[in-house]
Amino acid sequence: MKRASKFVAFLSGVALLALSCTDDCSDGGCGGGGEGECPTLAEGEWQISGDPRVDTLFRAALALLSRLEENEQVTRDTIADLAEALGVEIDPAAPLDESAAAVPGAMLVVVNDAVDYVAWGAGTCVADLPLAHEVAVECLTHFGCDVNGACLPEAGAYPPVACEGECVGACGAACSGECRTPVVDEQCNGTCYGSCNLAAAAECGGDCYGECSASCLSYGDDGSCHGPCEGNCQGICETIHGATCSGDCTGMCGTESTDACVGECHGSCEGECDGDCAGRPFTYCGDETCEYSSDCGSLGGILGWVEARATWVDYEIYWSADAEDDSVAIAELAYEMAALEGASRALIAANEDLGALVGDGDYGVTAIDGLSAAVEGLLDADLAEYDIEECKIPCVIPALEEVFEILSAIGTETPALVEAQVAILSALES
């Protein structure tokens, strides 16, 4: 309700400015604005006001809607692929939650009968930094600011900044979480990320490559264990996803931390995070005398975060056929397992992306958080401070209404998308 009342007040201010528009404004001479000629977000247009601080919000709203539509389509395609592989009939036009509900039952039958072990992981979503740079520079250039290119970090690298979300990188101050430091054949009194040399037989929390004292879920051509070992492993224990290790670890050793972390801090950082920060705003370090630096940098960060993607997706599935299965049954099972693997990879990435866009508890600031906060800031601002041409003012009103419609639709439609993804992923974990 608070946002709605702000919106009404803002539109009243826009209307007053619009009254000062001369008759020349109706001919579209400054890029549109005559009755019936306004560009709309529904048509994919976002350069409406002429002020990049406003137009970037329009662009971000469109991009966020597009990302969520893309995410929903990936989810629908995944459900359709799984349904086809498992012999389940679904109505392509049915609501997403109905389609998703039809698949897990058949998945559970296959998973419980044939799947021995499943492991997956996805890397933290990282913002589209080049896009953030581009948007910030275009905004600064519009206002005549000195764009100091040396201050813009290269793609994939961030300047150290205060981090409101999880920091993944060096933290010069206290790191509350896990600190991972590089090790080579060293004892790790924590979690080993990499590989563990087990000179003596011991439990392996990852994949065993060597001798397994009990059943191994996968074997190499030489007959040695190449997968999860149900007993003790002697050889190399691969712990890429993290596991305790009684031997020497090569890779990263993670231990609980409350102090400064010179390796990789995975948690909250009280100082500046030199690495990736989940939900971080983009900060521009250019012309300090330019009053628009903060606004332009933040807007670039919002759009960059809307385009955030999972950095990697890993998925492993071990399965086995019954001894009495003939070649046809085994081939059918292999087809089902391939469909499970392909669909799972796509859905894991989509679920991670969805968390960065609308939130699932893993990110301090989501894309919709950043966009909503920027819209709130616009509603609180004095419209006279914006560089909006008078003849474009009448077009700003419907465009802002479209932004509110987009945010409202996301709030009502996204829960079904989240539930559909969770339903499928939960069946895989069973």
Image: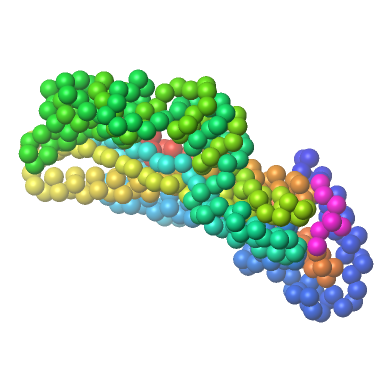
Horizontal side of 335 relative to 378 (left or right) equals left
Q: How many marks?
A: 0
Horizontal side of 414 relative to 334 (left or right) equals right
> What is the quadrant of residue 161 in the picture?
top right
User: Is 383 contained in the magenta span?
Assistant: yes
Q: Position of residue 221 (x, y in %)?
A: 8, 42
What is the span of residues highlighted in magenta in the rendered image? Answer: 380-387
Residue at x 20%, y 25% (from the top left corner) = 198
Q: Position of residue 154 (x, y in %)?
A: 52, 54
Q: Position of residue 85 (x, y in %)?
A: 27, 50
Residue at x 45%, y 34% (from the top left corner) = 264
Horizontal side of 191 relative to 226 (left or right) equals right
> What is the quadrant of residue 390 in the picture?
bottom right
Locate the C terminus by quadrant.
Answer: top left
| Residue placed most toward the observer, 166 or 341 | 166
| Residue placed most toward the observer, 145 or 384 | 145
User: Is 393 contained in the magenta span?
Assistant: no
Measured along the vertical axis of the image, is residue 67 above or below residue 352?
Answer: below
Q: Position of residue 298 (x, y in %)?
A: 67, 49
Residue at x 60%, y 29% (from the top left corner) = 270
Tell me, yes or no, if residue 123 can be seen here: yes
| Residue placed most toward the observer, 191 or 103 | 191
Render colour scheme? rainbow
**Residue furthest front in the image:** 150
Residue at x 53%, y 35% (from the top left corner) = 167
Locate the N terminus by quadrant.
Answer: top right
Tell me, yes or no, if residue 216 can be seen here: no
| Residue placed most toward the observer, 301 or 85 | 301
